[in-house]
Amino acid sequence: MSEKEYEKYYVPAESPWPFMGAVALFLMAVGAGNFVIESTRGKEGYGAYILGAGFIVLIVMLVGWFRNQIHESMSGMYSAQLGRSYRQGMSWFIFSEVMFFGAFFGALFYARFISVPWLGGASNNDMTGEILWPTFEAIWPLVQTPGGLTTEAMPWTGLPLINTVLLLASSVTCHFAHVALENNNRGKLKLMLGLTVLLGAIFMVMQIEEYIHAYNEMNLTLQSGIYGNTFFLLTGFHGFHVTLGAIILFIMLLRVFKGHFTPDNHFAFMAASWYWHFVDVVWVILFAVVYIF
């Protein structure tokens, strides 16, 4: 009876990077929470510094973890079975991201289609608006808070429309980069992937410009009631995902210039493209429900 051969499955040694990633996310959560509270109260504190420290730890973690992964991959430690595990892991990660954004979209829909009509006297709440908010109008977006602060709704034209075109174009260039890699066209791969990273970077700059415009010229801030909060919550978290996706794609670009990846072995690039396409799809939905409808 012959001994059955099993495919190797590389199990790495203990790594500090998951712990550092948890620390980075903790610092970012605490820093962002304190920064928002300090901003709404008009006080200066340590929120921004804690948030910045979280970003620094996150970047260090990404650089270190990616370095180890690249070394393992280029050393031939991986197998087809491990590749299937990576695909399953990335699929579950994207599913968790769907649930993440689904929760925030759910909060927006609840505020817009349940809370606002309820305050306006919908269903059996005829006296609700008169008691809680006498001057309330059941319209969306709410451009006036109970305290009397007013703001403007961010229009879908201008910067938001430009950003939509940028992200859609980046999804196209990312697809063509993937096709070029599968066809072993290294020149086209570098061009298309470089354009994808550039478009992502321009998107981030344009979103910063949009926030500056909202704060300085539209009085649309985190103090602008439920509309301002949901606007910055959704667009801000999406912007963070775009930033992370652009960093990952930039690392893929560096690897391409170093001669990494082949038409038959390039899951790292494929995973980055999956993530980028997911970010683009989320933006299309966000653009529709936050800016247009």
Image: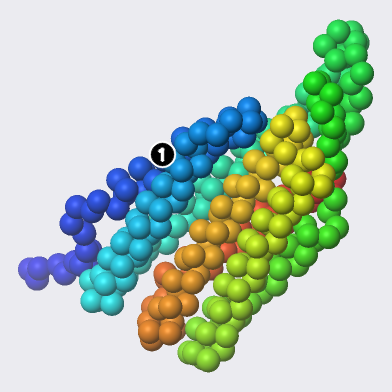
Q: Is residue 147 visible?
A: yes
Task: Please determine whether, in this image, residue 62 is positioned above or below residue 145.
Answer: below
Q: Nearer the viewer, residue 94 or 151?
A: 151
Image location of residue 115, percent across then percent down: 78, 23
Residue 123 vs residue 33: left or right?
A: right
Residue 257 vs residue 138: left or right?
A: left
Task: Please determine whether, in this image, residue 276 is positioned above or below residue 89.
Answer: below
Q: Nearer the viewer, residue 104 or 218?
A: 218
Task: Please determine whether, in this image, residue 224 is positioned above or below residue 22.
Answer: above
Residue 134 vs residue 170: left or right?
A: right
Image location of residue 157, percent across then percent down: 85, 58
The residue where tag 1 is placed is: 26
Outermost residue on the front side: it is 44
Q: Quadrant of the C terminus?
A: top right
Q: How is the image coloured?
A: rainbow
Image location of residue 60, percent across then percent down: 35, 58
Task: Please determine whether, in this image, residue 273 is positioned above or below residue 147.
Answer: below
Q: Is residue 289 visible?
A: no
**Quadrant of the rendered structure where residue 265 is?**
bottom left
Total marks placed: 1
Q: Residue at x 64, y 71 (%)?
A: 199
Q: Quadrant of the N terminus?
A: bottom left
Residue 139 vs residue 210: left or right?
A: right
Q: Nearer the viewer, residue 288 or 5?
A: 288
Residue type indicated by callout 1: Phe
Q: Residue at x 63, y 61 (%)?
A: 204
Image location of residue 220, percent across then percent down: 77, 40
Residue count near mark 1 (Cα–Cα under 10 Å), binned few <14, some 14–19, many ≥20: some
Q: Residue at x 48, y 56 (%)?
A: 91
Q: Residue at x 60, y 74 (%)?
A: 198
Callout 1 secondary element: helix
